[in-house]
Image: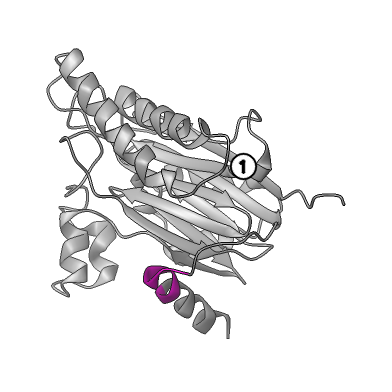
Amino acid sequence: MRKHIPEIESGGLSLVGLVREDNQDSIYLPNGHHAPERGLLYAVADGMGGYAHGAVASSLALEALANTLFERDDPNPKVLSNGVERANIEVYKAAQRLAAGRMGTTLTAAYILGDTLYLAHVGDSRAYLIRNGRAVCLTADHTTVGDMVRAKLISADKTRTHAQRSVLTKAIGLGLFVQPDITQHKLHEGDRLVLCSDGVWSVIQDDEFAQAANETSVEAISQNLIDLALQRETDDNVSVVVSHLRKLTPVHAEPESSQQSNWFQKLRKMAR
């Protein structure tokens, strides 16, 4: 019996932007070394500009995560959290080795296995799921402003313009331990997933991600989002990873988490 191989088109861009002198963002796309049946990894990491060696931190974090996830012979989404822990330790140790003071990075990683998305998130890069012409942000910003929104001290529409928008409350590499957000989401064929650094989403509204996803190719979506962020004079590096889930292979999965159920209740309401 012939296996149903998933068909996922993916692409991404990472540029220095208009203001920064170097690019401290890193992105990860499937490199063809792993069979799709083992799952596919997509990720964005944004090195912290206020600390030394931000570019080293972001690239090192993605390398550690991918190595942890794929060094096993069998795909296991539970290893995703182990990969984040390993990334955290590797960045922390590199800071000590380089005498660089504190090194840090955000990390938002999407591991797609069958028809399920396993999402690991630390910091304020974001993951958007676009379905039926609507975009939903699947991540919660680990920032001072994000905490204020969740505490209902300010409204969500103030997030992009608040003076403390970029003040992180959690990041990879700043300490020996980090607690990532790990969520699980059921995917549909035709979904598009967008991962991006805050240099992109800070100047692009959520509904504009859905509009950009109307393009037929992931390269066009990535380029249009980058161009729009630059046109609006973002003051940070700009990175985007886009995947189009054309065909998926259902596999036996664990019951949906409560966080997953909450997100998809929202999606179902939006689709009505």
Q: Residue furthest right?
A: 1
* SS for callout 1: helix
Quadrant (top left/top right/bottom left/bottom right) for the C terminus = bottom right
Residue 224: image x %, image y %? 56, 47
Q: How is the image coloured?
A: one colour
- Residue 22 showing in the rendered view: yes
Name the residue beneath numbered marker 1.
38
The kind of residue tagged 1 is: Arg
The residue lying toward the viewer, choosing from 260 and 197, is 260
* 189 is higher (above) or lower (below) than 266: above
Residue shown at the point (20%, 53%) measured from the top left = 143
Q: Position of residue 214 (x, y in %)?
A: 65, 60
User: Which quarter of the figure has residue 102?
Assistant: top left
Q: Nearer the viewer, residue 154 or 138?
A: 138
Q: Is residue 268 left or right of residue 138?
A: right
Across and down, in percent, residue 199 comes to 36, 44
On screen, 24 above or below 166?
Answer: above
Residue 32 higher or lower than 1, as above or below? above
For the point 59% across and 51% down, which residue is it? 113
**Mark 1 crowd level (few <14, some 14–19, many ≥20, 10 Å Cα):** some
Q: Residue at x 57, y 80 (%)?
A: 271
The boundaries of the magenta stretch are: 256-262
| Nearer-the-camera pick, 45 or 259 | 259
